[in-house]
Image (spheres, grey):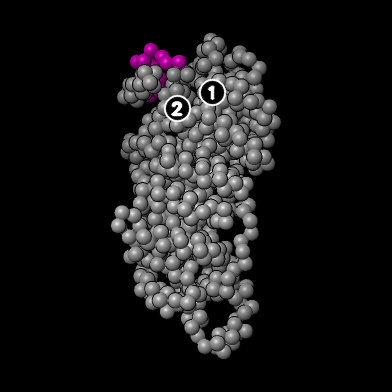
Amino acid sequence: MRVRTAIGRAVGLLLLAAGPPAAAFAQDDGLQPYQLVRSLQLVQDRIAGGDHAALPMQAKLLEMTDARLRAADAGDFKDPKNFRALLVYGMSGGNPVTVEAAASRAATDPQSLAIAKGVVAYLNGRPAAAIEILKPIDPMSVPADLGAFLALVKGSLLATDEPATALTLLDEARLLSPGTLVEEAALRRSVGLAATQGDAARFALASTQYVAGYLYSPYASQFADSFVSGVIALHMSISQDKLADITSMMDPEREKVIFLRIARRAAIDGLSDLSAFASARAEQGRNGKGNQDDPRAVLYSGLSTVTSATIDDVRARLGKVDRGKLSESDRALLDAAQAVAGEVVAPVRAAAMNETEAGPAKSDAAKPAETEAASQADAEGLPPVEGAMAEQPAPVKPADAPAATSAPPAPPTTAQAAAEAQAPAPAQPETPSVLPASTPAAAASLDPHDPTDAAMLKARRQLDQIDQLLGAAPK
């Protein structure tokens, strides 16, 4: 605790120092590379826990650490802690040119040099070479400060070809570095991998642990994507009680949006029971504060019961939905639901004639409509948190897109096929009322000439880059 406090004070002093990094080093009489890297890790751990105000501090520390490592000589790397710090810096969003140049000046043991070569290959976008170099090295056999990052990188590199091995490596990363940005990234990727592996128990456990520790991380929107997709893919294995237990740890607004997203995806995929449960929970709210006036909850509830015996009630509820508060794609779903409800109560002969005349057209229209609806569901995220960042799309498909390898959806119900047939041409994704800080519109609102805005823009770019290095294989 005293060490972390001392490092925190050092960070504060360094960030208050005026002028370029060189001036800061001159005033502080020079810090060792491992001290700067530990300070960087401390700041990143605060960010993972939800402290978005630390983003500019992270950018400053990356800049200072880069300058220090560029100036390091062979004598600096005689201390093994400094060479490990170089490798950790590289896997924390560092400059690959700096890592390669500094490693070439160091004289250290063969295994450390091999790790350096693997990290450089990883940073330079050569995952195959990185896997070949790093695969024989056991993260548990090296010091924990390096082993945690090594396990995370290896787990991400192997996620596509060896998902079971990747999950084991992600567990090792968490074991070696609990309560850190490494654990946040490892947990988030475990959620997606568990879903692709069909491991409902592991999916539920990883989701519970993530929500408990990292719900306010800048990367939580990526977790939400994996969670919703996993719930849909594992709907036969995840009980409604377990789902409610996990979401009960969220704040009411996030819980509502998660259930709305699940209800929408389930309704589109024809999972009536799950859609009805999720939409009911979204309407129910928490602490006596219901969401019955939310038109999305009413719409998704109607989609899940549109062919039930209470069709008159459903039609009445759908008729009261405020179209002006729906996205364009949800207005298309509302039109389809009302059309299907009308067919349910239409005379049998008329319904049969319509089916005969429009059958081929319905069949052809169903597929693009279903695809568009599913993509729209994926585009909706958690309510933006000030300073929150959306993660860059990760190229490791099993970790970040669990639905892609899930079991094929059940054949659509009659109501679903009719709803899809009524859907118009693909609509543009919904524009949220408040954009996340990382969206182009939000970034455009910042003045690059203003020191504070410039720092935030740089921090956002660093955050996206760092998360890619913390587990997504380079493109």
Q: Residue at x 30, y 57 (%)?
A: 288
Which image quarter: residue 269?
Answer: bottom right
Tell whether 133 sits left or right of 373. right
Residue at (65, 36) in percent of width and height = 165
Residue 144 circle label: 1
Say which mark, if any, is on residue 342: none
Residue 79 picture location, percent across and down: 53, 12
C-alpha distance separating marks 2 and 1: 13 Å
Front-lying residue, 300 or 434: 300
How many neighbours does mark 1 have within 10 angstroms: few (below 14), some (14-19), or many (20 or more)? Answer: some
In the shown orientation, is residue 55 left or right of residue 152? left
Q: Residues within 10 Å of mark 2 (few under 14, many from 20)?
A: many
User: Which residue is denoted by mark 2 in the rendering?
Assistant: 41
Q: Secondary structure at mark 1?
A: helix
Report the amino acid beneath label 2.
Answer: Gln
Amino acid type for the residue under numbered disc 1: Ala
On-image quarter of the C terminus: top right
Which percent across, then down, holds residue 366?
59, 70
342 is higher (above) or lower (below) than 71: below
Quadrant for the N terminus in the image? top left
294 versus 312 height, above or below: above
Q: Start and end of the magenta stretch?
A: 19-32
Q: Does residue 19 appear in the picture of this structure?
A: no
Asked whether the beta carbons under mark 2 and mark 1 sit within 8 Å of each other, the answer is no
Q: What secondary structure is marked by label 2?
A: helix
